[in-house]
Amino acid sequence: MIKEFFKTFRVKREERLPSLVALLLFVTVNVMVVSKYFHVFSLTGKAVWKQFVWNFQVSGFDPITYTVLTIWDASYDPYRHPLLAFFVYPLHLLNEGLTGLTGMNLVQLIVMLPLVFCAYYSFIFIYRICREIVGVSRFDATLLAFFLFSFAYVLLTFAVPDHFAPSMLMLLMALYVSGKCMQRGRRLNIRQTWLLFFFTAGTTLSNGVKIYLDALFVNGKRLFRPKYILLAIVLPCALMWCFATWEHRTFTLPREAKVKAKMIADGEKERQQLLAQFRDTTSLSDSAAIMRVFNYQMQVRKHTIWLENQKKPSNVNKGKPMEGDGFMKWTDISTPRWESLVENVFGEPLQLHPRYLLCDVLRNRPVIVTYDHWVPYLLEALVVLLLVLGSCCGLRSRFFLMVASGVAFDAFIHLVLGFGLNEVYIMTAHWVFVIPIAVAFLMRRLAGRWLMAVRATTLLLTIVFYVTNLVLMTGYFCG
């Protein structure tokens, strides 16, 4: 099994040239991001969290990985990314050693290595899916692989220190492995399911659901065998949940308690300073009267601060949850669905909005931003048309239905429940690969002029997206 795993990452002869061109692209985009922040992030002896989180702004992506690699802690939400901090621990050790040798924090360069690796093999796997699983020509598979990486938030995903890059790699690898099992008439065995679930759910817990959807389409009725259900589903899920709970109690709760205690101490210190100032300026002499008036002023001050906080983008744009506790606190019932679908699901992920370029919705960007011209909407409509036509062509394919089921799961949590809907574009890497896969099914069905028309349209979209997105990204990171 180990030999087969490493064989999966062996680059084939026909993949070498296109993947090398793609590799140069990935390195270039990463260098642009590194160059924008290196003069700040390479410094040592700073307050790490403030240094990274306050200065880094690339849309809504978080630089938590920079923090974890600088001063290791399980800083990710354990119920969303239960194993991610432990996956990157070796990189923390590497960064710690290089910092001691160079006197600089080279965390950006270290993070760049796995990002480029994930981008490179994501390119390889989408190429193989289109070429080997769907069955299009080498030219079409190459075109569709570059088409995927022309999308704005695919390029960005593999250049920012967030968790979406390894997530996309694992999802594509799972689809490829599942597709090969279908072709060979084999099933996903317990060990394969464990391995895929461990890395996929360990990075992003919700994506673990997609591994079991893949297993359902590959194994069919055999999925419901008691042995498989117990050992491949119940046991790994239970272990992952227990580990996340242990991580929450061991790392998250003490950290939150420490932060809360510091806030209380700072608040009390400020209160005493304000009380001393009030005593020095008031004409009142009775202690009870002084405290009564002061407490009233503090209540007014507290309410004023609360009102000001409610006007901040972090509160205005976060959306109203269904409930305030548990997992339901991450839902959103107030963000408009149709506008989000047009601008933030099929708009911003494909082609950047020039206005509020890469701004953060929790800092300085409205939830809905429109394009200033009709051309981007025409391009978006062409992509949606290709997706719809390709989906119709793929409906009889068990493999495509498997891909579509994962996308349907994302649509449910984002568009129905509203999870992350206010900045849904940063989750693009979890689902957008359905577009080139659907187009591959469309290409396989067509011939002659119709096939040439689809190729020409895809090529045109690819060129336009690369030009517009890279120009805007270059201006943002290098301007």
Image (tube, helix red, strand yellow):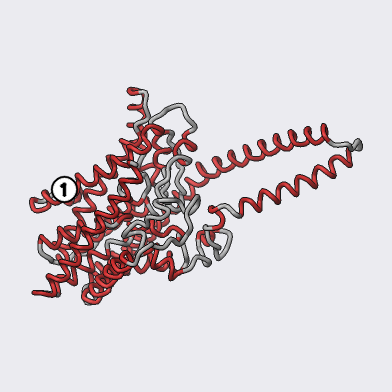
Q: Is residue 220 above or below residue 5?
A: below
Q: Estimate the x, y position of residue 340 in percent, counting from the top left.
A: 43, 65
Instruction: Locate residue 115: give its quadrant.
Output: top left
Which residue lies most toward the front here?
A: 373
- Mark 1, other Cα within 10 Å: few <14 / some 14–19 / many ≥20: few
Q: Residue at x 32, y 37 (%)?
A: 35
87 or 368, nearer to the observer:
368
41 or 359, nearer to the observer:
359
43 or 476, nearer to the observer:
476
Q: Residue at x 30, y 48 (%)?
A: 158
Left or right of 112 in this view: 308:
right
- Number of disc labels: 1
Q: Estimate the x, y position of residue 300 in percent, counting from the top left.
A: 75, 49
Image quarter in which the C terminus is found: top left
Left or right of 229 in this view: 73:
right
The residue labelled by disc 1 is: 21
Q: Amino acid at mark 1?
A: Val
Q: Estimate the x, y position of residue 88 in percent, counting from the top left.
A: 35, 40
Q: Residue at x 32, y 57 (%)?
A: 429
Give the structural element (helix, strand or loop) at label 1.
helix
